[in-house]
Amino acid sequence: MRANVLKRKLTLRIKRKKRIRAKISGCENFPRISVFKSNRTLYIQAIDDVKAVTLAAVDGRKLGVKANKEGAKKIATEFAKVLKAKQIEQAVFDRNGYVYHGVIAALAESLRENGIRL
């Protein structure tokens, strides 16, 4: 029973992800900020979909933070510094199929607080 529930949740997340990706894309001046959340850590990257290149990335493991709201705020602060160093102040937020709640919402709000327009 449990395996079926987990498989169904993953299937629904992948369907949401495909719907979102069909509608948004990023370019060099207006990149797509993609978030991946595992049970232990968070990964965030800015992607130029025109050239298919990652412009900037921050790994939660290297910062030594967990995948909770406090960790999301630290990762977002560090990521905002990296984006500002590359003179990127505006982006489109790709929640990657995750529900905009909790860790994902905290990450987006922290990016906005640090001067990145989403």
Image (spheres, rainbow, N blue to C red):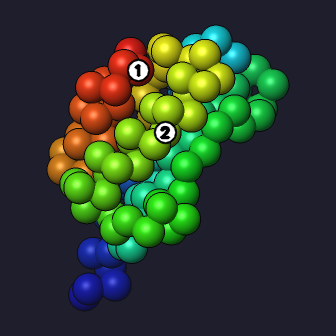
Mark 2: secondary structure: helix
Q: Residues within 10 Å of mark 1 (few under 14, many from 20)?
A: many
Residue 61's tag is none
Is residue 99 visible to us here?
no
Q: Is residue 78 above or below residue 24?
A: below
- The answer to whether the residues at label 1 and label 2 have Cβ atoms under 8 Å apart is no
**Residue 74 horizontal side relative to residue 58, left or right:** left
Q: Image point 61% across, 16% down: which residue?
A: 87
Residue 54 percent location from the top left of the image: 71, 37
Is residue 81 visible to us here?
yes
Answer with mark 1 or mark 2, whichever residue precedes in sequence. 2
Q: Is residue 38 above or below residue 102?
A: below
The image quarter in which residue 22 lies: top right
Task: State the residue in front, 107 or 83.
Answer: 83
The image quadrant where one finds the C terminus is: top left
Residue at the disc numbered 2: 79
Task: State the residue in front, 29 or 80.
Answer: 80
Residue 66 percent location from the top left of the image: 34, 68
The image quadrant where one finds the N terminus is: bottom left
Q: Amino acid at mark 2?
A: Phe
Residue at the disc numbered 1: 116
Q: Image point 69% across, 26% down: which residue?
A: 48
Q: As drawn, which residue projects farthest toward the left? A: 102
Q: CA distance from mark 1 to mark 2?
A: 10 Å
Mark 1: secondary structure: loop
Q: Image point 69% across, 32% down: which residue?
A: 55
Q: Amino acid at mark 1?
A: Ile
Residue 12 percent location from the top left of the image: 36, 54
Q: Image point 56% across, 28% down: which residue?
A: 83
Q: As drawn, which residue projects farthest toward the right? A: 51
Q: Is residue 75 above or below residue 40?
A: above
